[in-house]
Amino acid sequence: MPALLRAWRVGEKAASIGIDWTDEAGPRGKLDEELGELDQAIERADAPGASEAAVGEVTAELGDALFSLVNLARKRGIDPEAALRGTIDRFAGRVARVESLCRARSCSSADLDASTLDALWAQAKAASNEGS
Protein backbone atom coordinates (compact mmCIF):
# COMPACT_ATOMS: atom_id res chain seq x y z
CA MET A 1 0.00 0.00 0.00
CA PRO A 2 1.42 3.46 -0.84
CA ALA A 3 2.64 5.33 2.24
CA LEU A 4 0.17 8.24 1.93
CA LEU A 5 -2.78 5.85 1.73
CA ARG A 6 -1.43 3.73 4.58
CA ALA A 7 -1.02 6.85 6.75
CA TRP A 8 -4.63 7.81 5.95
CA ARG A 9 -5.91 4.35 6.82
CA VAL A 10 -3.92 4.14 10.06
CA GLY A 11 -5.35 7.55 11.01
CA GLU A 12 -8.86 6.28 10.23
CA LYS A 13 -8.26 3.15 12.31
CA ALA A 14 -7.00 5.23 15.24
CA ALA A 15 -10.03 7.53 14.91
CA SER A 16 -12.39 4.53 14.89
CA ILE A 17 -11.20 3.60 18.40
CA GLY A 18 -11.25 7.17 19.68
CA ILE A 19 -7.61 8.16 19.10
CA ASP A 20 -8.06 11.33 17.07
CA TRP A 21 -8.28 15.07 17.28
CA THR A 22 -11.71 16.64 17.57
CA ASP A 23 -11.06 18.94 14.59
CA GLU A 24 -8.39 19.96 12.11
CA ALA A 25 -6.73 22.32 14.60
CA GLY A 26 -5.17 19.28 16.31
CA PRO A 27 -3.18 17.94 13.36
CA ARG A 28 -2.43 21.50 12.21
CA GLY A 29 -0.88 22.31 15.59
CA LYS A 30 0.95 18.97 15.55
CA LEU A 31 2.40 19.88 12.15
CA ASP A 32 3.89 23.07 13.59
CA GLU A 33 5.33 21.06 16.48
CA GLU A 34 6.80 18.43 14.16
CA LEU A 35 8.32 21.06 11.85
CA GLY A 36 10.01 22.64 14.88
CA GLU A 37 11.37 19.24 15.88
CA LEU A 38 12.55 18.68 12.31
CA ASP A 39 14.40 22.00 12.36
CA GLN A 40 16.10 21.02 15.63
CA ALA A 41 17.03 17.58 14.27
CA ILE A 42 18.54 19.18 11.16
CA GLU A 43 20.62 21.51 13.33
CA ARG A 44 21.93 18.57 15.37
CA ALA A 45 22.64 16.50 12.25
CA ASP A 46 24.49 19.39 10.59
CA ALA A 47 26.64 20.10 13.66
CA PRO A 48 30.29 19.14 13.39
CA GLY A 49 30.83 15.58 14.60
CA ALA A 50 27.12 14.67 14.46
CA SER A 51 26.37 11.03 15.16
CA GLU A 52 24.59 8.65 12.79
CA ALA A 53 21.69 8.73 15.26
CA ALA A 54 21.38 12.49 14.82
CA VAL A 55 21.31 12.06 11.05
CA GLY A 56 18.67 9.31 11.35
CA GLU A 57 16.57 11.56 13.58
CA VAL A 58 16.03 13.90 10.61
CA THR A 59 14.36 11.05 8.73
CA ALA A 60 12.12 10.24 11.69
CA GLU A 61 11.09 13.86 12.20
CA LEU A 62 10.41 14.32 8.49
CA GLY A 63 8.17 11.23 8.64
CA ASP A 64 6.35 12.68 11.66
CA ALA A 65 5.71 15.92 9.75
CA LEU A 66 4.42 14.01 6.71
CA PHE A 67 2.12 11.93 8.92
CA SER A 68 0.76 15.12 10.50
CA LEU A 69 0.06 16.51 7.02
CA VAL A 70 -1.84 13.35 6.06
CA ASN A 71 -3.91 13.63 9.24
CA LEU A 72 -4.69 17.25 8.44
CA ALA A 73 -5.76 16.18 4.95
CA ARG A 74 -7.94 13.43 6.45
CA LYS A 75 -9.64 15.90 8.78
CA ARG A 76 -10.27 18.24 5.82
CA GLY A 77 -11.47 15.40 3.56
CA ILE A 78 -8.65 16.04 1.07
CA ASP A 79 -7.01 13.11 -0.72
CA PRO A 80 -3.30 13.70 0.02
CA GLU A 81 -2.25 11.63 -3.00
CA ALA A 82 -4.33 13.80 -5.32
CA ALA A 83 -3.06 16.97 -3.61
CA LEU A 84 0.56 15.90 -4.04
CA ARG A 85 -0.02 14.77 -7.61
CA GLY A 86 -1.52 18.17 -8.46
CA THR A 87 1.44 19.98 -6.91
CA ILE A 88 3.91 17.80 -8.81
CA ASP A 89 2.06 18.51 -12.06
CA ARG A 90 2.09 22.28 -11.44
CA PHE A 91 5.76 22.21 -10.45
CA ALA A 92 6.75 20.14 -13.50
CA GLY A 93 4.82 22.51 -15.75
CA ARG A 94 6.63 25.49 -14.30
CA VAL A 95 10.01 23.80 -14.72
CA ALA A 96 9.14 23.12 -18.36
CA ARG A 97 8.08 26.76 -18.78
CA VAL A 98 11.39 28.00 -17.33
CA GLU A 99 13.24 25.72 -19.76
CA SER A 100 11.15 27.12 -22.61
CA LEU A 101 11.88 30.69 -21.53
CA CYS A 102 15.59 29.86 -21.41
CA ARG A 103 15.48 28.35 -24.90
CA ALA A 104 13.73 31.49 -26.17
CA ARG A 105 16.66 33.50 -24.78
CA SER A 106 19.15 31.05 -26.31
CA CYS A 107 20.59 30.26 -22.91
CA SER A 108 20.81 27.40 -20.49
CA SER A 109 19.30 27.59 -17.02
CA ALA A 110 22.65 26.27 -15.71
CA ASP A 111 24.28 29.49 -16.97
CA LEU A 112 21.87 31.83 -15.18
CA ASP A 113 22.36 33.39 -11.77
CA ALA A 114 19.86 32.83 -8.98
CA SER A 115 18.08 36.17 -9.40
CA THR A 116 17.52 35.60 -13.12
CA LEU A 117 16.22 32.09 -12.44
CA ASP A 118 13.92 33.50 -9.74
CA ALA A 119 12.55 36.01 -12.25
CA LEU A 120 11.94 33.27 -14.82
CA TRP A 121 10.29 31.13 -12.13
CA ALA A 122 7.99 34.04 -11.25
CA GLN A 123 7.10 34.38 -14.93
CA ALA A 124 6.40 30.65 -15.23
CA LYS A 125 4.30 30.69 -12.07
CA ALA A 126 2.28 33.69 -13.27
CA ALA A 127 1.68 31.97 -16.63
CA SER A 128 0.49 28.79 -14.92
CA ASN A 129 -1.84 30.77 -12.63
CA GLU A 130 -3.43 32.44 -15.65
CA GLY A 131 -4.74 29.05 -16.75
CA SER A 132 -6.26 28.24 -13.35
Image: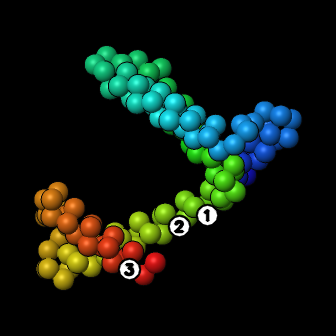
Q: At 65% from the left edge and 44% from the top edge, which residue is drawn?
A: 24
Looking at the picture, how far across and down is residue 66, in whole percent? Answer: 56, 43
- Above or below residue 32? Residue 88 is below
Asked whether 122 or 52 is in front, the reply is 122
Residue that numbered label 2 is attached to:
86
Q: Quick check: marks 2 and 1 in contact, CB under 8 Å?
A: yes
Where residue 40 appears, as percent x and y from the top left, is 41, 25
- Camera-near label (3 vs 2) is 3
SS label for mark 1: helix
Considering only order in the chain, which callout, 2 or 3, is on the residue closer to the N terminus?
2
Q: Residue at x 17, y 70 (%)?
A: 108
For residue 3, say whether it is visible: no
Local crowd at mark 3 within 10 Å, few (<14), some, or many (≥20)?
few
- Residue indicated by mark 1: 82
In the picture, the disc for residue 130 is 3
Residue shown at the point (50%, 35%) measured from the top left: 32
- The x and y percentages for residue 83 are 57, 61
Pick whichever, 114 or 26, lies toward us.
Answer: 26
Left or right of 84 on screen, residue 10: right
Q: How busy is the neighbourhood of tag 1: few (under 14 within 10 Å), some, or many (20 plus)?
A: few
